[in-house]
Every structure is written in structure tokens, then in C-alpha cells.
């Protein structure tokens, strides 16, 4: 009965996380369709995410962000800050470089989730994880190599920092399972908006652009983040990060269908290396677990 219960919880976490990543995959194309400066996009993205998540928090727990921060303290604030920085970096990097480059970088989340899990939770770094890191690093180098002298280098670097924040946050929430997921997302939205407010002119956004930002901030992002955060209750952080790799395929697909943007060849080459490393690691881990 215990094994059956664990299986059901694992399946629930899987379904929750997959639904979250499908919603999240529309993030990139909505940012592009909004066609407004990155700081304006980041500001409204953060504010709207915080509004929706505040409503969810009140309906579910009959409390506010202030009450949650008072009760949970530093673990909640740190998780929210990581959400906030990852959201800000994602918006800015998508505006500065090829969208597929940023989304391929996101597939590095399992690497950083594993490293963070080693330091935060004492989880053993397997040989498969080291292999994944080495192969993925080669893929990143290929993606960066084409832009060393170009204007996309800064965008690629900021995109590289996104999975660092995401992977670390997934491990942190795995360690602190009692963190309020809605409160963490609210905090992240406010952090993003606060930083962006120093550079943004948010009230200059046109009506159509604001419509896309509403779809992004009120619906897609908060629901996706809440679902992915909830997934860490039932799955290891590295597995949730692995599911998030699906955005590597879905995000560029939406950008291609709606915007006609085709990634350069080096993105495909580097992306194949990164994905091969991650999938090989997952397969080796699966075999090891089955033997165990």
C-alpha cells in the first residue's frame, strides 16, 4: 500500500509539473508579441504575476504575503528572490538574443539543481551527473562561440544565469518543503517589478502590448510557477528541472509559428549536446535506481 501511495504521489507531481511547463512555454512568444522594451515587460510581468498569485494565496490560505513572510521568514524571501531574478533575467535575455538560445540554456537547470542539491541537501553527485555537466558545458561553449564578437553575447550570458537561479530555487524549495508556493511567486514578482521600475516607463505601453502582457502575467506565468513549485513537493528538484527541459522544444516552436524566427545552426548543435547530456544522465540514473 505504501508503494502504491508513493506511486500516486509521484504521478501527481509529474502531471502537475508537465502542465506547468506547457503553460510556461508560451512565455517567450508572449514577450516577443508584446513588442515593448524589456524593462517595461519585466515590470508588468512582475506586477501582474504578483496580483494573480496574491488572489490565489488569499483564496487558498486566507492570508497575505506579509503574514507569510512573518511566519516563514528567510526561506520564503530567498526563494522569492530567486524567482524574481530568474524572471527578470529571462525577459531581458529574450529581448537581447535569439529566443532559442535562452530556452536551450534553461535545459541546464538539472545541472544546477544537482549541484545545489549536493550543497543544500547532501545529495550525492553521481557519475551520470558529472557526465551531464561536461557534455552540457560543451554545448554552452558552442552556443556562446558564435557571439563572442557579436551583440548577442550579453544576452546569452544573462540567459545562462536563468537556470542557475531556477535550479538553485528548486533545490531550496525541496529543502524547505513548507515554503508557501503562492507567497514565493508573489515575492518573485515584486522583486522583478522593483528592479525593473528603476529603468522602465510602464505607462507608455500600447493597448495591444498590454493585452499580451496580461495573458503573460495574469494567466500563464503565475499558474505555471505555482504548478512547478508544487511539483517539488512530490518529485526531486532535479526531476522537476528535467521536466522543464520540455520548454526547450515548445518555446522555439511557438516563436517559429507566431514570429517566424529560425534559430542559427550553432543553437541546434549546442542544444543537441546539452539535451544529449541531460537525457543520458537521466537514463543512467534510471538504470541505477532500478538495480538498487
Image: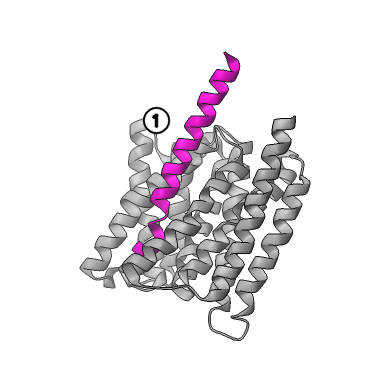
Picture colour scheme = one colour
Q: Is 109 displayed left or right of 181 in the figure?
A: right
Q: Residue at x 70, y 41 (%)?
A: 285
Q: Position of residue 169 (x, y in %)?
A: 58, 48
**Relative to 28, does residue 72 appear above or below in the rendering?**
above
Classify the position of the N terminus by image quarter.
top right
Q: Residues within 10 Å of mark 1 (few under 14, many from 20)?
A: few
Classify the position of the C terminus by image quarter.
top right
**Relative to 103, does residue 4 appear above or below in the rendering?**
above
**97 or 54, which lies in front?**
97
Q: Position of residue 15 (x, y in %)?
A: 45, 36
Query: Residue reaching furthest left?
Result: 207
Q: Is residue 183 in view from this perspective?
A: no
- The residue stretch that appears in magenta: 1-30
Q: Residue at x 63, y 57 (%)?
A: 276
**184 or 214, which lies in front?**
214
Q: Residue at x 64, y 37 (%)?
A: 175
What secondary structure is marked by label 1?
helix
- The reply to whether the magenta stretch includes residue 11 is yes
Q: Main secondary structure of the magenta part?
A: helix
Q: Is residue 24 in view from this perspective?
A: yes
How many numbered marks, from 0 up? 1
**Relative to 215, does residue 157 appear above or below in the rendering?**
below
**282 or 172, which lies in front?**
282
Query: Residue reaching furthest top?
Result: 1
- The reply to whether the magenta stretch includes residue 104 is no
Q: Position of residue 225 (x, y in %)?
A: 45, 46
In the picture of the structure, the residue carrying the numbered disc 1 is: 61
Q: Residue at x 35, y 35 (%)?
A: 58
Amino acid at each position: 500500500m505504501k508503494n502504491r501511495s508513493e506511486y500516486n504521489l509521484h504521478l501527481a507531481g509529474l502531471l502537475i509539473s508537465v502542465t506547468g511547463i506547457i503553460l510556461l512555454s508560451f512565455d517567450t512568444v508572449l514577450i516577443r508579441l508584446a513588442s515593448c522594451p524589456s524593462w517595461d515587460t519585466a515590470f508588468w510581468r512582475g506586477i501582474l504575476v504578483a496580483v494573480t498569485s496574491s488572489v490565489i494565496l488569499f483564496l487558498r490560505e486566507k492570508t497575505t504575503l506579509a503574514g507569510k513572510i512573518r511566519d516563514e521568514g528567510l526561506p520564503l524571501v530567498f526563494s522569492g528572490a530567486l524567482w524574481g531574478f530568474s524572471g527578470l533575467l529571462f525577459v531581458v535575455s529574450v529581448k537581447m538574443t535569439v529566443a532559442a538560445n535562452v530556452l536551450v540554456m534553461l535545459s541546464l537547470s538539472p545541472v544546477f539543481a544537482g549541484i545545489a542539491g549536493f550543497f543544500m541537501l547532501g545529495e550525492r553527485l553521481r557519475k551520470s551527473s558529472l557526465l551531464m555537466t561536461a557534455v552540457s558545458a560543451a554545448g554552452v561553449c558552442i552556443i556562446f562561440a558564435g557571439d563572442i564578437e557579436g551583440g548577442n553575447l550579453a544576452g546569452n550570458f544573462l540567459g545562462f544565469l536563468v537556470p542557475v537561479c531556477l535550479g538553485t530555487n528548486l533545490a531550496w524549495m525541496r529543502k524547505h518543503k513548507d515554503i508557501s508556493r503562492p507567497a514565493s511567486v508573489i515575492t518573485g514578482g515584486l522583486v522583478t517589478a522593483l528592479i525593473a521600475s528603476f529603468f522602465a516607463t510602464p505607462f507608455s505601453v500600447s493597448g495591444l502590448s498590454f493585452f499580451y502582457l496580461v495573458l503573460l502575467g495574469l494567466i500563464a506565468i503565475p499558474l505555471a510557477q505555482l504548478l512547478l513549485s508544487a511539483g517539488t513537493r512530490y518529485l526531486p528538484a532535479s526531476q522537476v528541472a528535467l521536466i522543464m527541459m520540455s520548454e526547450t522544444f515548445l518555446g522555439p516552436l511557438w516563436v517559429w509559428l507566431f514570429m517566424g524566427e529560425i534559430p542559427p545552426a550553432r543553437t541546434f548543435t549546442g542544444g543537441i549536446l546539452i539535451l544529449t547530456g541531460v537525457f543520458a544522465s537521466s537514463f543512467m540514473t534510471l538504470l541505477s535506481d532500478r538495480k538498487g
